[in-house]
Image (spheres, rainbow, N blue to C red):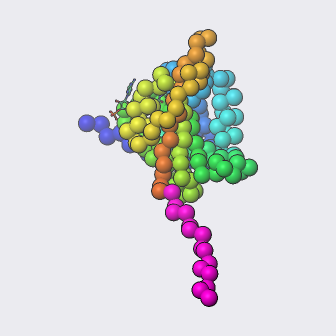
Amino acid sequence: MVDIKTAVEPLEEVSDEDLEDLCDAAESAILDGGGFGWLRPPPRAVLGRYFRGVVQVPERHLFVGRLERRIAAAAQLQEPPRNNEAQAHAAMLTTLFVAPWARGQGISARLVQAVEKRAVELGYLMLNLDLRATQEAAIQVYESLGFERWGTNPAYALVDNQFVEGYYYSKQLRKLPKAKKPKIKKKLAK
Ligand SMILES: CC(C)(COP(=O)(O)OP(=O)(O)OC[C@H]1O[C@@H](n2cnc3c(N)ncnc32)[C@H](O)[C@@H]1OP(=O)(O)O)[C@@H](O)C(=O)NCCC(=O)NCCS
């Protein structure tokens, strides 16, 4: 049996070689029909600028999956905007993909777990995500890792002038801390 080396890790700086591989992997996932929002691959320069930008944004954390050291997959943790106090407990898992030639090695589950772990380390309570209802392999991955579907948007995406349903999933990462009971001063009995 051939021993294929896989690894999943955060990517904080992108070398030219990694960027080439990341763009190749993303392009092949988009062409295969599931490209984190893209229906057709954008020009290479746009994709390259996108990933170079991602690693610069403090609220975004990029994780990559490698096969024999070459990047073949990616996912991101997106923190909420700082001005949204009411939703400061919830982060998003976005843009998960594995290049078609690297699938079936369990890379996506490890990427999701890496994103989850970082979200826990950053103190988040919930991890949310959404995706097209047609992304069946991803649905299988998320549900097997404990994400619960709580909503459907019938007009989530527009593909070939047809609406495509989208699903919303969440996972609670830890228990809600117990609310402190307000201390009531007992009236001293006269
Ligand atoms: C989702 C994705 C990342 C999974 O890649 P992967 O790690 O190689 O996953 P696998 O091929 O090992 O499949 C994962 C699971 O889904 C199942 N699966 C694969 N293709 C499937 C399909 N078409 N329908 C239903 N289940 C499917 C597999 O059997 C496997 O389940 P198991 O672990 O119980 O055997 C990959 O298919 C992909 O990049 N898809 C396009 C992008 C996408 O949908 N991203 C998510 C939304 S942002």
184 in the magenta segment: yes
> Mainly helix, strand or loop, the magenta region?
loop
Which quadrant contains ligand 1?
Answer: top left
Nearer the observer, 147 or 48: 147
Q: Residue furthest right?
A: 83
99 vs 80: above or below: above
State the image coordinates of residue 125 (x, y, percent, origin top left).
54, 53
35 vs 189: above or below: above
Q: Residue furthest top?
A: 161
Q: Residue furthest bottom?
A: 190
Nearer the observer, 10 or 1: 10
Q: In this view, does 155 lie to the left or right of 97?
A: right
What residue is rendered at 54% in x and 37% in y? 129
Q: In which quarter of the image is residue 143?
A: top left
9 in the magenta segment: no
Residue 121 at least partly seen: yes
Q: Quadrant of the N terminus?
A: top left
State the image coordinates of residue 94 (x, y, percent, origin top left).
57, 37
Q: Quadrant of the C terminus?
A: bottom right
Q: Residue furthest left?
A: 1
State the image coordinates of residue 103 (x, y, percent, origin top left).
41, 31
Residue 30 at least partly seen: no
What residue is rendered at 64% in x and 37% in y? 51
Residue span colored magenta: 176-190
Count of picture labels: 0
State the image coordinates of residue 12 (x, y, percent, origin top left).
61, 49
What residue is rendered at 40% in x and 42% in y? 145
What residue is rendered at 47% in x and 22% in y? 134
